[in-house]
Amino acid sequence: MSVRPLEVDDPRTVVDQLRGRISALQGGPSRLEVPTLPMFDGLVRLRTGGVYGVDSATLGMALAAGASQAGEWVGFVGWEDFGVEAAHQQGVDLSRTVLVPAPGEHWLEATAGLVDVLKVVVLRPPGMVDAKSASILDARLRARAGVLVVQGDWPRCEVRLSAEQSVWSGLGAGQGFLRERRMELVARGGGRLPARTEVVLD
């Protein structure tokens, strides 16, 4: 008698389910998926308790926008040049957004406080972050089921997103209006090969 291996359409779904069951058996909080914009499909899945790196303000806002549109509160720490109009265009609901533009040396306390009450916090740390500070926020994220998005250096990220080959269109021979921005997004980390996709931003 031969036994055939179980065939599934999407092995990742089965793995995610098993991880959730293991976490429940161990008494730890389940890592729930947080909504993201369609532009991130196939690249990254935000999960509570995780830290995700980005290389631009545009990507930071876009990662927060999915949760914001789903009705969650989001926050931005260390964004002195936070663009209200840019955030709105990315899909961030400003009525459910908390901004701490210049926390200075208290950035860790400010971020930890927001992680306690918000679903997604986007942080621009003032410089290199040591492992101790990162571990404090890691533990807070797991306990409070939050997500941290970091623009800058961070000791450990589940996935790092970067924008490559960015091209604007709309200008003709030195005149006209910028209509859209086309760029290639690359996701690295998570124990997999880099994933790439092309997106268009109006």
Image (cartoon, rainbow, N blue to C red):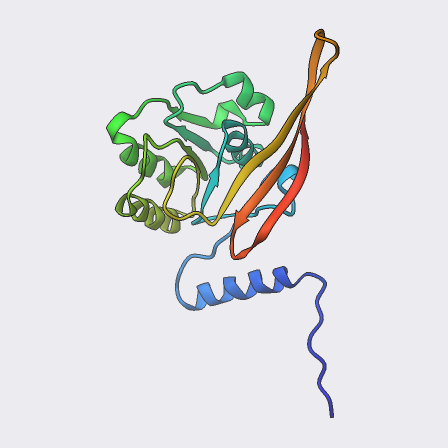
155 on left or right of 96: left
Q: Residue furthest bottom?
A: 1
Q: What x and y, as percent, mark residue 156?
A: 40, 48
Quadrant for the N terminus, please. Answer: bottom right
Closest to the observer, 72 or 63: 63
Q: Is residue 4 visible?
A: yes
Residue located 51% across and 36% down the image: 72
Closest to the observer, 162 or 57: 162
Q: What x and y, as percent, mark residue 65?
A: 55, 32
183 on left or right of 95: right
Q: Residue furthest top?
A: 175
Closest to the observer, 180 or 102: 180
Residue located 55% across and 20% down the image: 86
Number of marks present in the image shown: 0
Q: Is residue 34 visible?
A: no
Residue located 39% across and 51% down the image: 142
Quadrant for the C terminus, please. Answer: top right
Quarter of the image where one finds residue 112: top left
Q: In the rendered view, would you say 144 is above or below 182?
A: below
176 on left or right of 82: right
Q: In the rendered view, would you say 133 is above or below 193?
A: above
Q: What x and y, as percent, mark residue 194?
A: 58, 49
Q: In the rendered view, would you say 108 is above or below 145?
A: above
Residue located 73% across and 16% down the image: 170
Quarter of the image where one finds residue 173: top right
Q: What x and y, as percent, mark residue 8?
A: 70, 67
